[in-house]
Amino acid sequence: MVIVAALYRFTRFADPAALKPPLARVCCANGVKGSLLLAAEGINGTIAGPREGIDTVLAHIRGLPGCDGLEWKESTAAEMPFGRMKVRLKREIVTMGQPDVDPAAAVGRYVEPADWNDLIRAPDVVVIDTRNDYEVAIGTFQGALDPGTTSFGAFPDWWARNAERFEGKRIAMFCTGGIRCEKATSWLVGQGVDNVHHLRGGILKYLEEVPAEDSLWQGDCFVFDGRVSVGHGLAQGPHVMCHACRRPLAPADLDHPDHEEGVSCARCIGTYSDADRARFRERQRQVALAQTRGTRHLGDSAEA
């Protein structure tokens, strides 16, 4: 069994580049794979590996400046959901394109998973899904608004166009693990929106803690690793990844005539050139060849 840990922490790193080499070394030395992002505003990512390895890496991260209060969400996978370990330097750990936003200084009100249902059922509450459209398509909360954005950076413009609709309402926001809605609530607070709430720990914490029979979640939750989606109890969902457009595919999507494993799906069939598809077919051939050898091709991964 592989332990999967999704984590983030908004804090101020004076020199994130100096943190990268030792972080990469401790991950690789302990059999941990995945993706971690470092920026001046903090750390974000998902890692997977053996129990001892994950514990060692988490201990290292908690020792970074301002990370002693690090929170993370754990789940399990039957096999390693990542092909390699990547530690990257970024301008933002979650890209919003609003340089003045500082979640370490101010955010909305946290709502625990056990209290989330009561909040979003209230008639004066508007529930907003801050994730991308392809994530929303496979699952969201009952009654939630879908901004229809293709990137988190589009959220401020969407809000500006729709803010008048929400006057006099309480705002409840959520995302996969908490990082996007935490940054979004920080931005809204900076815009003068006072009554804004967000789900602590995100959808993952809700699916872990709230029983299915009491849940207002509908569908599955997209995750950024080889499992593709999870459901209640964080059990792996039925989706697979289109390795061309990186969108999740339900079992029914695999029967569509435009689906070709590793090459195209119904959503992206008209997007790529013949040369692109030839390249994708070669990659898929290498993936299949690696599988026959009992190994894993690095292209066979849901990493972004």
Image: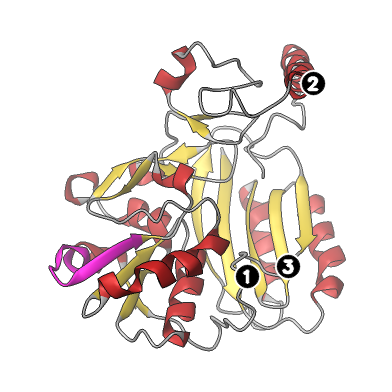
Q: Earlier in the sequence, mark 3 or mark 1?
A: 3
Give residue 97's mark.
1
Indicate yes or no whether the magenta region holds residue 125. yes
Start-end of magenta stretch: 118-128
The residue that appears at 50% across and 65% down in the rendered structure is: 180
Q: Are marks 3 and 1 in contact (CB under 8 Å)?
A: no
Q: Is residue 23 left or right of residue 92?
A: right
Q: Residues within 10 Å of mark 3 (few under 14, many from 20)?
A: many
Q: Earlier in the sequence, mark 2 or mark 1?
A: 1
The residue that appears at 40% across and 46% down in the rendered structure is: 136
Give residue 261's mark.
none
Marks 3 and 1, how far apart at CA = 16 Å
Q: Amino acid at mark 3?
A: Leu
Q: Is residue 132 above or below residue 165?
A: above
Q: Is residue 248 left or right of residue 15?
A: left
Q: Residue 240 appears at what percent x and percent y?
A: 52, 28
Q: Earlier in the sequence, mark 3 or mark 2?
A: 3
In front: mark 3 or mark 2?
2
Q: Which residue is mark 2?
A: 275
Marks 2 and 1, how far apart at CA = 33 Å
Give residue 38's mark.
3
Q: Residue 109 appears at what percent x and percent y?
A: 35, 80
Q: Pick whichever, 152 or 269, lies toward us.
A: 269
